[in-house]
Image (cartoon, rainbow, N blue to C red):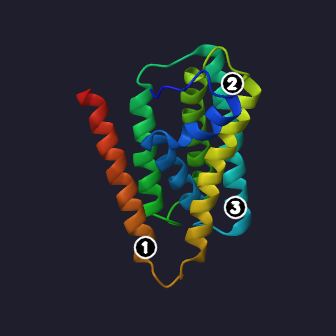
Amino acid sequence: MEEVDEFATPWAAALAHPFSGADHWLAALAVGLIAWSWDRPRALRSGAAFALSLLLGIAAGRAFGSFPLMETGLAATVLLGGAAVFAARRGSPRGAIALTSAIGAWHGLAHGAEMPATTAPLLYALGLTLSSSAIALAAGLVASALPHGRAALPRWAGASLAAAGAYLLLSTFAA
């Protein structure tokens, strides 16, 4: 798990945290690409489900602490997210929302378990959710601006995310 500076303000530490580990920002990137591979209403529902699941996961992680294989699960979310981006629009929209919710919940558990005991929990949770959602939104907006005639682009992005997730997953076993 990444170390969070307990002397920084909770808001600044929370905003910076999703950028401090590859698993966090790659998962948020995957969420954005998954969400925006569908139409705008589904993308917004998927993004909202991610944010809500992240908040609920943070609360559960704060309440119950770390779970076994936490880092392995984080790496697996990147791998699964990449696979979903690769297979864009082949699954169901509900499946995409369920996957982005699961990614949010698992990352929320990790964030909540890592939260310094001396921090303001609500402020920290809101900062984490805001920055994670901003990464997802930025990825989705970039993806939606790309020409739709380039079907290989989402596949390359998905394959790259899945490969990064596989690397992270293998590195959890090597540690």
Mark 1 packing: few (<14 Cα in 10 Å), some, or many (20+)? some
Tell whether label 2 touches label 1 (CB within 8 Å).
Answer: no
Judged from the image, the secondary structure of the residue bearing numbered disc 2 is helix
On the picture, is 163 further left or further right than 37? Answer: left
Mark 1 to mark 3: distance in Å?
A: 21 Å
Which residue corresponds to mark 2?
59
Q: Quadrant of residue 55?
A: top right
Residue found 38% across the figure and 31% down from its top: 72
Identify the mark nearer the N-term, 1 or 2: 2
Q: Quadrant of residue 174?
A: top left
Tell whether label 3 touches label 1 (CB within 8 Å).
Answer: no
Task: Note whether 10 is above or below 16 in the view shown.
Answer: above
Task: Note whether 112 is above or below 53 in the view shown.
Answer: above
Which residue corresponds to mark 3?
42
Identify the mark nearer the N-term, 3 or 2: 3
Mark 1 to mark 2: distance in Å?
A: 36 Å
Which residue corresponds to mark 1?
153
The amino acid pointed to by label 1 is Leu
Which is more toward the observer, 60 or 97? 60
